[in-house]
Image (cartoon, rainbow, N blue to C red):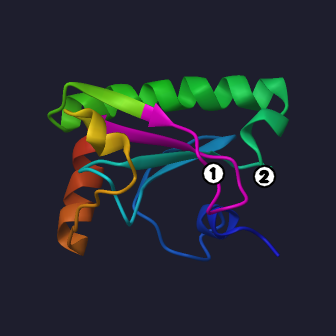
Amino acid sequence: MPSIFTQIINGEIPSYKIDEDEHCYAFLDINPNALGHTLCVPKKEVDKLFEIDIETYSHLMEFAKRIAGALAQAVPCKRVGMAVVGLEVPHAHVHLIPINEMHEMSFQTKVKMQEDDMISLVEKIKSKL
């Protein structure tokens, strides 16, 4: 059975898509640690990040760097943190989280956002790409 991320990439489950290319897909996390919390995933479904072939891995990092640059311009923050945890979904992914304090990377604090806010934020980030 395809992972939830593969279903999102295939358009079977809706997402707040920021960008995609031939190999990667970026979208807002629906249970964000902070405003702008974004997931970057390879379209190739592989469970663990370090099991991805080197070309896909390198491209994912370049893709995430580009998305992080747009996030930093769109969401006021000291920096964009990056985390690879990957226990909850068996599909490699990178978390990009605009942060001002270390605790915002803890995955314990969450922010609540309405759909209109998510859509508005996607458009703001996309405008910075």
Is residue 88 rendered magenta in the image? Answer: yes
The local secondary structure at tag 1 comes to loop
Q: On the image, which quarter does residue 7 sit in?
A: bottom right
| Mark 2 lies on residue | 47
Q: Residue at x 35, y 48 (%)?
A: 37
Q: Residue at x 61, y 63 (%)?
A: 88
Labels in figure, total: 2
Counting residues from the N terminus, which is met first, the one under dot 2 or under dot 1? Answer: 2
| Rendering coords of residue 58 (x, y %) | 69, 23
The residue segment tinted magenta is 82-98
Is residue 33 rendered magenta in the image? Answer: no
Relative side of 76 to 61, left or right: left
Q: On the image, which quarter does residue 101 sit in?
A: top left
Residue 86 badge:
1
Amino acid type of disc 2? Asp
Label 2 neighbour load within 10 Å: few <14, some 14-19, many 20+: some
Say if mark 2 contacts mark 1, CB within 8 Å: yes
Label 1 neighbour load within 10 Å: few <14, some 14-19, many 20+: some
Relative side of 6 to 71, left or right: right
Q: Residue at x 59, y 70 (%)?
A: 11
- Residue 128 can be seen in this image: no
| Rendering coords of residue 10 (x, y %) | 66, 66
Amino acid type of disc 1? Gly
C-alpha distance separating marks 2 and 1: 8 Å
- Residue 22 vs 53, above or below: the answer is below
Q: Quadrant of the N terminus?
A: bottom right
Q: Quadrant of the C terminus?
A: top left
- Residue 82 vs 115, above or below: the answer is above
Q: On the image, which quarter does residue 98 sit in?
A: top left
| Rendering coords of residue 8 (x, y %) | 59, 67
Q: Residue at x 22, y 29 (%)?
A: 73
Q: Nearer the viewer, residue 9 or 80?
A: 80
